[in-house]
Image: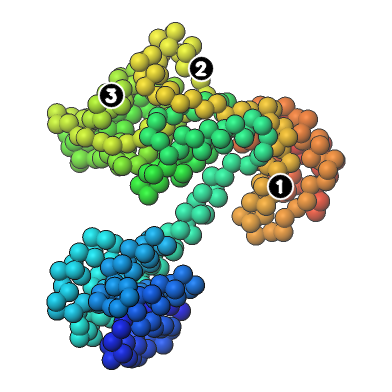
Amino acid sequence: MSKILIIEDEETIRRVLVSILSEENESYQVDIAEDGVVGLEKIKNNDYDLILCDIKMPRMDGVELLEAVKKIDSEIPIVMISGHGDMETAINTMRLGAFDYISKPPDLNRLLNTVRNALDKKKLVVENKILKKKVSKKYEIIGNSEAIERVKLMIEKVARTDARVLITGPNGTGKELVAHQLHDKSDRSAAPMIEVNCAAIPSELIESELFGHVKGAFTSAVKDRLGKFEVANKGTIFLDEIGDMSLSAQAKVLRALQEGIINRVGADNDIKIDVRVIAATNKDLKTEIAEGRFREDLYHRLAVILISVPSLNDRREDIPALIEHFATKIAAEQGNAVKHFTQDAVNLLKEYDWTGNIRELRNVVERLIILGGNEISENDVKAFASK
């Protein structure tokens, strides 16, 4: 059911609008207010999906109400109702955030189309919020150990900036979770975050993957293709395992960071980009620099902020929470009830040497859920979680 508020000081217009909307869709719940002051009070105390608001009203006009509502909830679509003498003002309200305007007397088709479009937009906003919550839940960082709390604090400090971040740590520690958290909490979160696994792309293709190519640039280039940097424009690019990138690709990435410019393979023209770069590696890049495999100037460009993700062995106190998290997640994926791990089972898992870190723990939890009893015991761990 969609809740619509009509704010209009002319009773005749109010009745016409209520009649039109009620006949159009029985699921519309229509509320009314005779001026802006009453309307604003109702908005503060109710959740409306759409507001239709007159411009000229006593006590508080439509422009004042529009500005007040945008401070309360910037996502409520507001359609302004204008008389013939108010058209210029109505157009100006669009700059202030109004969804649209309709003129008096209201044209039936114009009104209904505007209402439908506004409600569709509100629905889309709500769905996007739900989806974003699901996505952010997927990349939640589990644990409250001192080591992981330092990482969370660093994310909070850095996320809202455009500073480049280099995330270090062994394989399986969750470096990609840190990258996603940095993006999700940033002002770029509405734009895409594009992930590139530099270790998974052959060295001869990495430049094309990152910067794109034009038709005919090489044998298999049968059409123009956008690179990851262009796709990530206004958003974030996550260069995972950057220590495996070729030196020639490193040189081009360095130019992109220095000048904000890229070139597609086979093209001469410059393309301006606005991308935040987050990189990650499990390698010691200073050793790689000393041995000539990584550019020192690129390292300093990337490592404006360094975030070191601890190994699971360095945050053993988080293992119980991680076990519970994975057990719940796996049960949901398999459509089964959540299996409980006894305290003895958890204590034994806390003693293991987790060389594969969180990724290994997740696999072990899944194996125990599949092979163990209805309650995962210490004996199950000894039998099925052998190291």
Task: Between label 3 and label 2, give the one nearer the viewer.
Answer: 3
Q: Is residue 241 visible?
A: no
Left or right: 108 with respect to 177?
left
Q: Secondary structure at mark 1?
A: helix
Q: Secondary structure at mark 2?
A: loop
Residue 368, x across and y down, in percent? 74, 44
Q: Is residue 2 above or below residue 320?
A: below
Marker disc for residue 284: 2
How far apart marks 3 and 2 lie (CA) works out to: 23 Å
Determine whether label 3 and label 2 are within 8 Å by CB: no
Marker disc for residue 354: none
Marker disc for residue 324: 1
Sequence-wise, the earlier of marks 3 and 2 is 3
Looking at the picture, tell me which residue is in the foreground, 163 or 183: 163
Determine whether label 3 and label 1 are within 8 Å by CB: no
Colour scheme in use: rainbow
Sequence-wise, the earlier of marks 2 and 1 is 2
Other-residue count near label 3 (Cα within 10 Å), few / some / many at <14 / 14–19 / ≥20: few
- Farthest residue, direction top: 290
Q: Is residue 191 visible?
A: yes
Residue 282, x across and y down, in percent? 52, 24
Other-residue count near label 1 (Cα within 10 Å), few / some / many at <14 / 14–19 / ≥20: some
Other-residue count near label 2 (Cα within 10 Å), few / some / many at <14 / 14–19 / ≥20: few
Residue 236, x across and y down, in percent? 37, 39
Task: Between label 3 and label 1, give the one nearer the viewer.
Answer: 3
Looking at the picture, tell me which residue is in the foreground, 308 or 229: 308
Looking at the picture, tell me which residue is in the foreground, 86 or 322: 86
Left or right: 157 with respect to 38?
right
- Farthest residue, direction front: 59
How far apart marks 2 and 1 lie (CA) works out to: 33 Å
Residue 238, x across and y down, in percent? 41, 35
